[in-house]
Amino acid sequence: MSNDPDLPPLIHVEVRAAELEDLRVFARETGADLGCRATPRREAEGWVVDAYLPEDRLATARSLRAAGRVQLEVRENATALGRERQAEVGTGNRFSGGDVARGGQTVRGTDLAPVRGLGEKR
């Protein structure tokens, strides 16, 4: 997700079609981002795939030749959702306050032993 305010927001859409080939043609014509591994899901009426389009290309995508064979359902504004989630992330170093002693016998301030042995060779 870009933090550039001049770029249009990225919109998450579900693309539905009766045939897989209709999804392929739509993706080629629009240049929609289908992720690293586009995985269409089988449904009773056909196929569904998640796609991401800049908001300014959404109207164009709806008017393309391939758009007549697919249905677009806007799910969310992925850019706005990403910004909301980023606001939840702290900015400080959670290990600098002395709450966790790396390699210590106990977690500072408690009688609890740190978790050890995960992936440890014996």
Image (tube, rainbow, N blue to C red):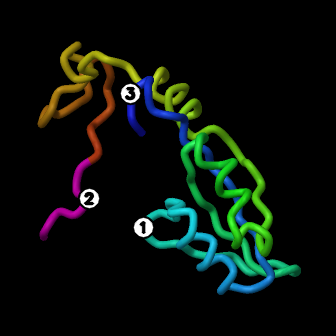
Residue at the far top: name it.
97
Q: Which residues are magenta?
A: 116-122
The kind of residue tagged 1 is: Cys
Residue 96, picture quadrant: top left
Q: Residue at x 46, y 72 (%)?
A: 37
Above or below 122: residue 55: above
The kind of residue tagged 2 is: Leu
Local packing at callout 1 (Cα closer than 10 Å; few below 14, some 14-19, many 20+) is: few
Look at mark 3 in the image and give the residue it sits on.
4
Residue nearer the viewer, 102 or 72:
72
Of circles 2 and 3, the one toward us is 3
Of circles 3 and 1, the one toward us is 3
Above or below 25: residue 94: above
The kind of residue tagged 3 is: Asp
Measuring from the top left, give residue 23's x and y in whole percent: 65, 76
**Chain-order first, disc 2 or disc 3:** 3
Of circles 1 and 2, the one toward us is 1
- Label 2, secondary structure: give it: loop
Q: Is 113 within the magenta?
A: no
Does residue 15 appear left or right of residue 52 in this picture?
right
Q: CA distance from mark 1 to mark 2?
A: 30 Å
Q: Residue at x 22, y 63 (%)?
A: 119
Residue nearer the viewer, 83 or 120:
83
Q: Residue at x 51, y 30 (%)?
A: 85
**Chain-order first, disc 3 or disc 1:** 3
Assign the C terminus to one quadrant of the image: bottom left
- Please tell me whether the stretch drawn in magenta is mainly helix, strand or loop: loop
Residue 25, picture quadrant: bottom right
Q: CA distance from mark 3 to mark 1?
A: 23 Å
Q: Residue at x 80, y 82 (%)?
A: 18
Measuring from the top left, give residue 56's x and y in whole percent: 59, 41
Mark seen at residue 36: 1
